[in-house]
Image (tube, coloured by chain):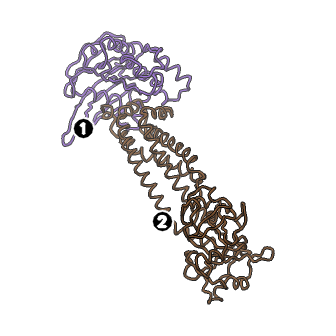
Amino acid sequence: MKDNLISIKSVTKSFTKGKTTITPLENLSLDVPRGEFLSLMGPSGSGKTTLLNLIAGIDTPTSGEILINGEDISQLSRAQLTKWRAVHVGYIFQLYHLVPILSAYENVELPLLLGKYSKAERKKKINAALELVGLSDRADHRPSELSGGQEQRVAIARAIVHDPDLLVADEPTGDLDRESADSILNLLNSLAKDHGKTVVMVTHDPKASAAAHRALQLEKGQFSSEGHLLNTSTQ
Amino acid sequence: MLPFTYALRNLFRDPARLLQTVGGSAVVVLLLIAAVAMNQGMDSVLSSSGSPRNVILMGKGSEESLERSEVSIDAESAAATSISGIETKLGVAAISGEITYQAPIRTSSGKEEPALLRGVLEKALLVHTSVRLLEGTFPGPGEVMVGDLTHRKLGVEKEELAVGQQLYFGDSAMRISGRFTAPGTVLESEIWFDRNDLSSLTQRDSLSSIILRLENTNADDVELFTFQRNDLELAAIREDKYYEKLSIFYQPIQIMTWVTAALVGAGAVFGGLNTLYAAFASRIKEMATLQSIGYTRTALFVSLIQESVLATLSGTLLAFVIAYFLLDGRTVPFSIGTFTLTMTPSVIFTGLIAGILLGTIGTLPPAIRCLLPSLPKALRSN
């Protein structure tokens, strides 16, 4: 039996817009084994970002269960979810979302300030994260002084610095050139393969999707097909 | 909680907005502390001007104003012989019949301003115990003595009222014989005449009031005297109570200063709201990112408030510096005297509270609006 980090059971997400009820996800189930790099593809409005937000505890489902590491996060309040995310999730955004007034070091430090780490412990973890993404020499640089690819690396360092089990990435290569995108995909792959992180990535880009262990296609809130399965040590 | 440095650095994210907030709050706080200092100064000068041991005998029915009061000259000797408990110094009873008159006075440079004139005899010094002669002599016929702040009341340089200079009451020239001080009282802005001079200049054959200094604060005997000598038509009022009543008369002016300060403050809050709505709206996504990392909305709200309060407190500090150089110690003339603006601890405390309130009240709605959207919606915002 596989050790699933994520187990989604019959999840539906609906919301009302004016008098219309929109259901981006309907009765969806999914299991993601620990250490898998999963790619979610699909056209705009297919529900892939909604699903990602549900997995990350950014949003809550209308019905169904979302078990992350055995804990049903669909029952948590907004405040409880905030605390849960601080420990269990690292979120990587398409446009990096770095705080412009903080240096790369300080941006990476943000998740650690929520934990009980001494200054020395924080420094050690931040330096390790920056080294892992290959940006040790850019620690003092502000986001405006970095390239897009470097900014996304800082964002990844910020996502992994507190050692969460789960990394979610929303179009992490959508704003990057091919070379930078490949480098980011390699990094995500390495985080899953070498560091045991479970990575769920939303992307439009088939090339990006090909870097994942498994790719799922979403259409109108349902999985339409399952893509390739790479032979990794986690499978 | 987010580190304090985050709020501090955010201040400099938009220097124009920072300048606007600091400048706006400085103006509001400056206005507010000026209003408080003014009201406190006025209250202080009025409350210090009266002694609880002094009783004023005034004409019945004109207790509201010394200038309108008329008391028979004979009443002074009658009071001196009939009332027990009047303080004596070197055998002289501390009782002073005085004429109080408000009239325009012209200086040698031609400037004419209304001033409070007091016609007195030398024994006035026995009842007005705060008065000290700084230089020159008590006024004799054809002479006047000016208070140390009379020049502020007349709006002239101090040198124009130096001993030996002339002042004009109508066409009558009066030589300044002396200069006196009476710290913190309305007396310090008055011009003291020889009583007989002022009597003939104002063409009146009565006094305005008789002031008695008692051995203690018990004025029962004075009250009894006014009942027994009904024919003199006198009313007795303790000097401190008289000035207390006067301060009620000035309350509308004080209320006006508060209303003006409040209106300007409200205008600043609304102006600040506009600026902050725009500033915080551009940071909705950043706030959402921080929430996605695990920061609570409360932590972010506190940080936004910290940021604004830092800006308004900087403005408050600027206001204190301006007030220290422009307002502190400045004397302000009003109808019956002059008061001094002082940066007392309570004035500073009021300014600090105003600075904090400006920062918090002005930030609440934009901060709530910034943090209220659902997280998925906020992350998608532009």
Q: Is residue B2 above or below residue A31?
A: below
Residue B241 percent coordinates (x, y): 61, 72
* Residue drawn where x is 68% and y is 78% of the image: B219
| Chain brown in the figure, letter | B
User: Mark 2 falls within which chain?
Assistant: B
* Outermost top residue: A231
Foreground of the two, B350 or B287: B350
Residue A199 percent coordinates (x, y): 35, 20
Foreground of the two, B327 or A98: B327
Q: Which mark, residue B126? A: none
For the residues beneath circles 2 and 1, the answer to whether they share a chain is no
* Label 1 Cα crowd, 10 Å radius (few <14 / some 14-19 / many 20+): few
**Secondary structure type for disc 1:** strand
Could you tell me the amino acid type at mark 1? Phe
In whole angstroms, how far apart are the C-alphas of marks 2 and 1?
58 Å
* Residue drawn where x is 46% and y is 61% of the image: B256
Q: Is residue A145 above or below residue B58?
A: above
* Label 2 Cα crowd, 10 Å radius (few <14 / some 14-19 / many 20+): few
User: Mark 1 falls within which chain?
Assistant: A
Q: Would you say B42 lies left or right of A130 here?
A: right
Q: Which mark, residue B252? A: 2
**Secondary structure type for disc 2:** helix
| Chain purple in the figure, letter | A
Foreground of the two, B164 or B125: B164
Q: Looking at the image, can residue A68 be seen?
A: yes
Location of the C terminus of chain A (image quadrant) = top left
Could you tell me the amino acid type at mark 2? Pro
Residue A23 percent coordinates (x, y): 21, 34
Q: Is residue B199 above or below residue A215?
A: below
Which residue is under mark 1? A15
Location of the N terminus of chain A (image quadrant) = top left
Between marks 2 and 1 in the image, the one whose residue lies nearer the viewer: 2
